[in-house]
Amino acid sequence: MKLLVRLYVQQFKTTLAMMFQYRASLVIWTIGQVLEPLVYLIVWLVVAKSSGGSVGSYTTADFAAYFIVLMLVNQVTYTWIMYEFEYRVREGVLSAALLKPVHPIHSDIADNISSKIITLPIMITIAIIFAFAFHASVAPPPWAILAFIPVLLLAFLVRFVLEWTLAQAAFWTTRVGAINQSYFVAFLFLSGQIAPLTLLPHPVQILSLLLPFRWLISFPVELLLGRLTMIETLIGLGAQFGWLIVSIILLRIVWRAGVKVYTAVGA
Amino acid sequence: MSYFRIFLAFLRVSIYVETAYRINFIIQLFQSLLNLGMTLGGLAIIFTYTNLLGGWRPHEVLALVGVYFLIGGIIRLIIQPGMEQLIESVRDGTLDFRLTKPADAQAIVSLQRVEIWEILEIILGLGVLIYALAKLGEIIGVLQAAEFVLMLTAGGVIIYSFFLILSTLSFWFVRVENILVIFQSVYEAGRWPVSLYPGWLRYGLTFIIPVAFATTIPAEALTSRLNWQTLVGAIALSIVLFIVSRIFWKTGLKRYSGASA
Amino acid sequence: MAYAIHVRALSKFYVVSQQETGTKAAFQNLVHRRKAEVRAVDGISFDIEPGEIVGFLGPNGAGKTTTLKMLSGLLHPTSGELSVLGYVPSKREAAFLRQITLVMGQRNQLVWDIPAELTFELNQVIYRIPRDSYRSMVTELTELLDLGSLLKKPVRNLSLGERMKCEIAAALLHRPSVVFLDEPTIGLDVTMQQRIRTFIAEYNRRSGATVLLTSHYMADVAALCKRVLVIHHGKLLFDGELSGLLQQFTSHKTIIIQLDNCKANLSNYGEVKSSEDGRYTLRVPKAETARVTERLLAELPVIDLLVEEPPIEEVIARVFAQE
């Protein structure tokens, strides 16, 4: 355990140094992270305004709050590992990681968290500015705010494990671009990034209940907006736990198979 | 005219590279369709709740999406690949090979790579565009069509010059690899009419990262929204930006060959 | 017109900011950047006649590549006179560029994923090579470089040596009259290095092209170049024939003797470089050579004695180590 803690701290220092080098990339990433929810926010505001101020149970203020919180939740939970993994397998640098006594996922989690510690203050600032600019309003009950913390943490874990598992497709093919894109499109629709899930057609909503995506984004967002009852929150937590177990099992299976393939080819 | 032949030579090379893998075609088709499906899905959801988006009718927005894919395809077919390779060649020194050739360096560097499968994106865009116009049921007059082509061309030139300016920065700053990614992210905002966005964003999408000139303005021409000020402005901007980018390129080249100071 | 290449007092200076490591230094650097002037090329002069093969010899960072880049128009000189085939290279006129070519050892102009042949065709278009000239040149180069079926394979499938051969061929398609070769044999195995040297010599003989070759391998230069320019720290240390180089820079000679009985202490006679089974190698100051040889023959049971120049590599290494 102590080893892991030291590892995470060390990774933080490394990430910090790298970020300093790549600060231009950072700005570019941030712009992308902000622009997408912003565009949907604006579009829905326009729709709401032309529909008498609200669509479904969302007023313009609600839409603003929804997408701003979504932006933050996305920022906290997103990963970029599927891009990097392809590089690692292709260039053979994965071999070095395989020789270490710690599972490579740890340094990736550490790297992910470290860079978010640095970028989150910026995003929160932007969120506050947007909240004022778009007149967002949100009034969650105190228990929801408390519950948000473990929910967000779980969302991060599940999303990370899931996407790390997805990234391993790189062991079997170099065409990860198409796979990643398919994942992101599904994620976009079924996690509530295009529109609050209650506004989507019924069949899509049912589908979103069965897949993990909604529990990673839509669920934490709706919780913090005070739109869920305690029962719904508990169900959501259960779903998150369930998906955490499923994704860890999936990870183990795929990783073992992937390493076999990788080492068989002579790394 | 010899530059056209040089372009054809580069095109032949690209065709050879890409057709070596038939699967590239399938994958590109899949990805383009996925992208289109995602965009259309978003549109469908929005338009279940409204009939008008910022004054644009559903099929007008669809026409905009068609233009978005059309120009997006052109950018990724011929503009972006060359600029990406330019940035890389500055870093690894292979630019020197381009510079010892008896042809204008900017031309070579701009034409040097063609991602031919982006043709699929262009075809899809055109398909969507034609469908949308048919559904709108309006007759597109010769004048309107001419305006459209003009705005498309102006938009293309503006985007090209913009890319060239960004890529030329690699003569000064080494870490510019990702700078072109910025356009990819921001271009996504071009799927919706730029007039929807608040003033500051509209300004940014017009004058800082000129997405509006690529998508909304040509679409405006097709949907009878284009006023003459925008028309003239777009043409003027395209000429000015082209000249500015060439001057900037020459300056960057001088710096690369240690001629300044 | 006399010279193919004419260079007078050519210099290239760079100003670089100096950066130390360490946090304190990093902060100091923010406020006050320390600058230093690097003299990559420092006032060199030489003239090369058409058809010569000339070698630029020097360690890494000596200024060879910088000089070559100035000669090919890639770099602007800081000061000095420079003309190649009567043109000012930095003007990069098309007529000039059509007559020169540049081959760089570590970098490829060949497009990676396609057969070399296609890059050839690209060059044909860019250099506007007429069809028959192109065809005959391809045939000639294929024969001289033994390219065989290499041209049809994607470049990434070729070995380093095969790639280099195709790279050189691609550079010569337009029959340039001046050929710049920057470390062309670097990273290649000995056989391939040999083949490329043979080719260059043959090409020069057939076409009369002026060849300028930089290398830090002595073997390249010794095999190909009658004339050698030695560069170090941006300055020209020597310009002339290779044999003259040895004359100028050696202060010692090597004496190899074979003794009848095995054991003898020869340290009185000179510096003992090696001793093995009665065969000794001595290093002796040039002036002393005659006297030491006399003494050896008189005082010891010598079966065989040989006086040699020190190996060229050693000479060069000492020259470079000096400054």
Image: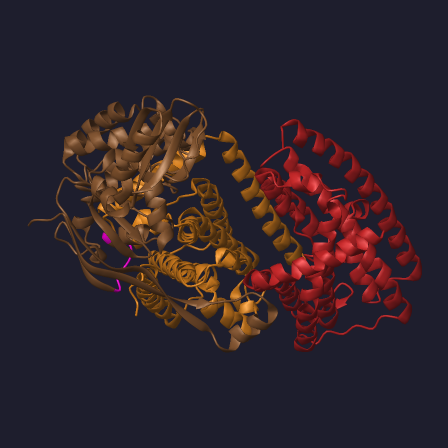
Image-quadrant location for residue A168? top right
Residue A67 visible in the shown view: no
Identify the hue of chain A.
red
Which chain has been coloured orange in this picture?
B
Q: Position of residue A147 (x, y in %)?
A: 88, 63
> Which residue is painted at 79% across and 49% down in the image?
A158
Given residues A45 and A66, the one toward you in this image is A66
Given residues B218 and C128, the one toward you in this image is C128
Q: Is residue C84 left or right of residue A224?
A: left
Q: Is residue A262 above or below residue A25?
A: above
Q: Is residue C148 left or right of residue C50?
A: right
Image-quadrant location for residue A61? bottom right
Q: Position of residue C75 (x, y in %)?
A: 29, 57
Q: Is residue A25 above or below residue C96?
A: below
Number of disc labels: 0
Q: Is residue A163 left or right of residue B14?
A: right
Read off the magenta span: C71-78
